[in-house]
Amino acid sequence: MIGASIAWKLAQSGVNATLFDAGVFGGETSSAGAGMLSPGGEFETPSVWSDLGNQSMSLYPAFVDQLRGESGMPIDFQICGCRKISEETGESRFYPGDGCVDPNDLLRALRLVCLGRGVTIVEKHRISPIESGDFDALVIAAGAWSNQLQVTIHGRRIDLPPVKPIKGHLIGFDMQQGTLASMIRRGHSYVLQRSNGFTIAGSTEEDVGFDRTIDSEICRQIHLDAARLFPPLQDAQPSKRWIGFRPYSEVPHIGRLQETNVFLAYGHFRNGILLAPLTAQRIALQIAGK
């Protein structure tokens, strides 16, 4: 998501870009995300995360409109609000500016606009090592895998800031459209509904490396917790179960790495989809020299 957004913005500025993916385009964390855009419900106290989240959320409507217009593709994007329930008191607070987006819609549109603007997309191509001097600029946007890349500058290997995978389970339900008006969250539990009725419940935070096992007991617990938030799920059966690897870092890495031509765009943890417009804008502006 973030790499493709950067490539698109670079191409808009007239910069030739090549996008490499070790797997298929958007096939890992980007397509696994629920698509919550919830700076209000996510960040309880002021921080670098809340500042970035609010800034990026303000960019989202224009980002989606431009992507829709250029790609001709539909994108399920809603400013539906989020009701956050306190774990301690049970009191509820509503954040009307929060929303959600279908990341798969974004990925389909991003692929089209990137190709339409001449971005070369190379899939199933694992890069290691890579000499940054071979390029005008090198952007590292490989999520939880980012610091595994062996990057050299004139033959000297550089250390990339640490990042690690935090596994999360999610489950989905095929439900009638319009049965859930806004997102609901309590602690790590949340429920959101796409425009087509597909309803997603999550999620866990598991520090277990790149373990791809789907644990049925964890999914059952997510179901129970989600049904407390949204009772119609109690008698529903999940139609889909899956996992994703969030790229954990204490702070997101967005920008130039010291005085090099290497740019970092990873470590967004639970907010990669939310922070995609802001990250793309910042990195593209720095590289394009504007």
Image: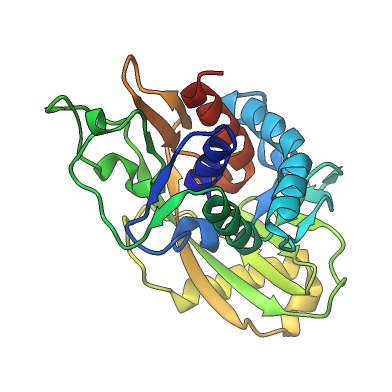
- Please determine whether, in this image, residue 74 is positioned above or below residue 157: below
Q: Nearer the viewer, residue 2 or 246?
A: 2
Q: Nearer the viewer, residue 190 or 148?
A: 148
Q: Nearer the viewer, residue 252 or 142?
A: 142
Q: Residue at x 53, y 76 (%)?
A: 241
Looking at the image, residue 157 sits to the left or right of residue 15; the answer is: left
- Please determine whether, in this image, residue 154 is positioned above or below residue 44: above
Percent of width and height locating residue 188? 61, 53
Looking at the image, residue 190 sits to the left or right of residue 231; the answer is: left
Q: Residue at x 74, y 67 (%)?
A: 228
Percent of width and height locating residue 51? 66, 25
- Please determine whether, in this image, residue 86 is positioned above or below residue 138: below
Q: Residue at x 66, y 85 (%)?
A: 237
Which image quarter holds the C terminus?
top right
Q: Nearer the viewer, residue 273 or 86?
A: 273
Percent of width and height locating residue 59? 73, 35
